[in-house]
Amino acid sequence: MFHDYLKNIERIEFAVTMMCTGRCRHCSEGDHINCKGHIDGDVATDAVRKICSHFKIKSLMTFGGEPLLYPEVIFAIHDTAREMGIEDRQLITNGFFSRSSEKISEVAEGLARSGVNDLLLSVDAFHQETIPLEPVMFFAESVVKEGIPLELSPAWLVSREDNNPYNNRTREIIDKFSHLGIPVGQGNIIFPEGNALKYLSEYFDNDVEASSPYDDDPTDVRSISISPDGSVDLMDGNIYETDIIELLQNYMKGS
Ligand code: SF4
C-alpha cells in the first residue's frame, strides 16, 4: 500500500508558522519578512490521527518561525499526539511570544496540559541579538514550575568548542539560566543556509560542500514534515487539498 521507502516512518514534524519574533542572523529560513499564517489546527490534528493509524510514530515535533505565536494550534497538535500514543512530544521555541507575565504563564500551563514532554528553548548569542532575555527567562521559569522537561538548545558557530565571539557570548547567556538548573542540550551547529550564509560566511569553508542535517533520505524516509501552508516535504501535494494517506500512497508510485 505504501512504497518500501516509507516503511521506517516514525516521526511527524510541523513547521507551524514561519512568522517569528526573532530576526536571527544565523536563521536557515532567511528574514521571515512577509511571513504570514499558520497551519490550521483541525487539518493538522486530522493528519496526525491518520498517519498514526498506519505508522508507529515515536516522536512529533512542532517548531517555526516562532510556534507559540499560535499556542492554541500547538496545544491541539500535542493533545492529539498524546491521544495517539506518540511518546516523545517536542516543541522548539525561542520563548518570546508575549511580554505579558499573565499570558506567558497561561501558555506554559497550556503546554503542560497538552502533554508537551520535551521542550527545547533556543537561547544563544544569535537569538538574543533581537530577542529580549527577560520574557524568555520568565517563560523558562514558568515551564520549570509546570514540570515540563526543558533543555536549553543553543546554536553554535563552527563547533561547540570553538572560541569565536559568538560562542563566548552564548556561554555568558547560558550562565544566566544556571539558577534554574536547566540542562544544556547538544543544540546545533549552524548550517550555511539562509541568513547564516549571508551574514556569517567568513566562518564557513566555501570549498566544502555542505549537506543539510535536516534533509531526509528519499529512499529511507523517517519523518513526515509538514509546512505552514500544508505542503509535505518530499510528497507531491498539500494536506489542505489531498488526504495525507493518499499523498503517502502516491509516493514514488510506479517507480
Ligand atoms: S532562528 Fe528561530 S528564532 Fe531566529 S529568526 Fe529563525 S526561526 Fe526565528
Image (cartoon, rainbow, N blue to C red):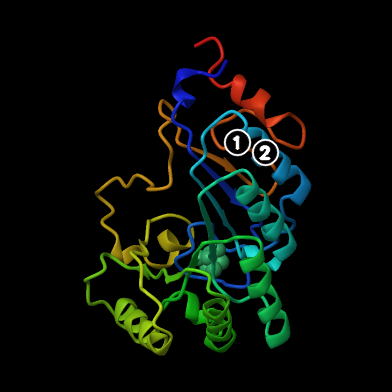
Q: Who's the residue at 37% across and 61% down the image?
A: 190
Please name the amino acid that badge 1 sits on. Answer: Cys
Q: Are marks 1 and 2 in contact (CB under 8 Å)?
A: yes
Instruction: Classify mark 1: helix, strand or loop.
Output: helix
* 83 displayed left or right of 242: left
Q: Who's the residue at 45% across and 19% down the image?
A: 4
Q: Position of residue 198 (x, y in %)?
A: 44, 62
Name the disc covering residue 10, or none.
Answer: none
The reply to whether residue 198 is in sight is yes
Q: Which residue is mark 1?
A: 52
Q: Quadrant of residue 151?
A: bottom left
- Please name whichever residue, 176 or 150, is drawn nearer the observer in this view of the structure: 150
Q: Who's the residue at 40% across and 90% down the image?
A: 179
Rendered-image quadrant of the N terminus: top right
Give the vertical position of 211 relative to 27 (above or below): above
Q: Position of residue 172 (x, y in %)?
A: 35, 87
Name the disc covering residue 49, or none.
Answer: 2
Q: Who's the residue at 29% across and 82% down the image?
A: 168
CA–CA distance between discs 1 and 2?
5 Å
Q: Position of residue 124 (x, y in %)?
A: 42, 76
The quadrant where ligand 1 appears is: bottom right
- Please name whichever residue, 162 or 248, is drawn nearer the observer in this view of the structure: 248
